[in-house]
Image (cartoon, helix red, strand yellow):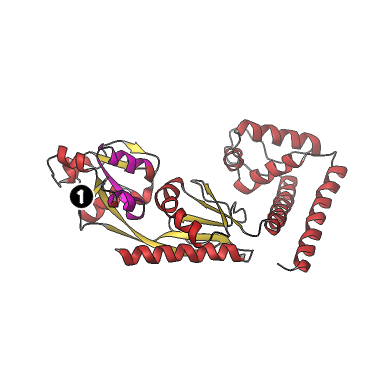
Amino acid sequence: MSWGDCTCKAKNFWTILGYFWSINVTMKNIPLNLLRTFAAIYETGGIRPAARTLDVAHSAVSRALRELEAQLDVDLIERVEGRRILEFTEEGNRVGRAALKAIRELERTLESVRRIKGRASVVLETTPSFASRWLFPRLGAFEQDLPWIELSVSVDQRMSQPGQLRADLVLRMGQGPWNGFRCHPLLDDELIAVASPRYMKSVKGKLALSKCQLLHDRDPLASWTIWQDRYQELGGNLNEGPRYTSGDLVLRAAEQGLGVALSRRSLAAESLERGLIVDVADPKSVPLENSIWIVTPQDLPLRKPVQKVVDWLKEQVACQRHSR
């Protein structure tokens, strides 16, 4: 980024701050957090969705809404008894559009200022399961290959909202691409049935999954119903067995000999190599094309360190593919 770009960003930053200062002066010093909360309500269309986005109690969002209406002395939402769908008044739509636009611009400006200072730092966000099972075993190699980059890893199950990416890049499982982001498929995957050698010994090596305890992942893309649709071999056993909230937990349960798990091979690879689990249905599997995606901000060019991390991830996938 050139000095001219930095100067432009700085000017934009102070312009936005000046905008909010003028709001404070003309609208009875309305706190910025009230506008941010209403922007979330307007964007998500409800109190509870806004609370989830802001990671606060829905009662706190309701209080902020009432306080903002009191300070503006105007109703921002329609209040009709028995109505469950939130509707905005004309004033609510005007304030919502303006607040959302200003908040997004302020976030982008602050992020740009932050990135100017930490040019060799990269924040990567992914799910807890993919971080612990695929990424972390490779971080030693990353330190050797790119020692000049400080890579920070953040985990989150939720997908960021358009225009609100919380990291330099995100590794996401799912059926992309997603609107509002720059998305590139990273790797294909497959679902495999795995269990510990101890468990297989307890069932005397039987491969009939209909006789085994099934372990369930809440990930809809790793559901036993997908296996049943393809192989028709689970019978009445399909809906039985304990359920776990992540691919990492269901694999840990399998490693502990609690039953048979349906797992992505990318997550199970290290445990398979260490002999903690075995592929009990080999060669059966369910292919998952474009299973993992690289997601980056749509409106910002990739900095050199971020592009280096993206290239390194692709190299890791290529090495994994060739080692099979």
Residue 52 belongs to the span the image colors magenta: no
Q: Secondary structure at mark 1?
A: loop
Q: Dividing the picture into quarters, in which one does residue 182 lie?
A: bottom right
Residue 186 at x, y percent in the picture: 44, 63
Q: Residue at image x 25%, y 49%?
A: 193
Q: Residue at image x 36%, y 62%?
A: 320
**Does residue 308 appear left or right of residue 117 in this picture?**
left
Residue 71 at x, y percent in the picture: 80, 36
What crowding class fits label 1: few (fewer than 14 Cα within 10 Å), some (14-19), or many (20 or more)? many
**Majority SS type along the magenta span:** helix
Q: Nearer the viewer, residue 321 or 264?
A: 321
Q: Dividing the picture into quarters, in which one does residue 173 lie?
A: bottom left
Q: Nearer the viewer, residue 63 or 278?
A: 278
Q: Residue at image x 67%, y 57%?
A: 115
Q: Which residues are magenta?
A: 249-272
Residue 52 seen in render: yes
**Does residue 215 appear left or right of residue 295 in this picture?**
left
Q: Which residue is mark 1?
A: 280
Residue 261 belongs to the span the image colors magenta: yes
Quarter of the picture holding the C terminus: bottom left
Residue 73 seen in render: no
Q: Nearer the viewer, residue 213 or 124?
A: 124
What type is the residue that disc 1 sits on?
Answer: Val
Residue 118 at x, y percent in the picture: 66, 56
Quarter of the picture holding the N terminus: bottom right
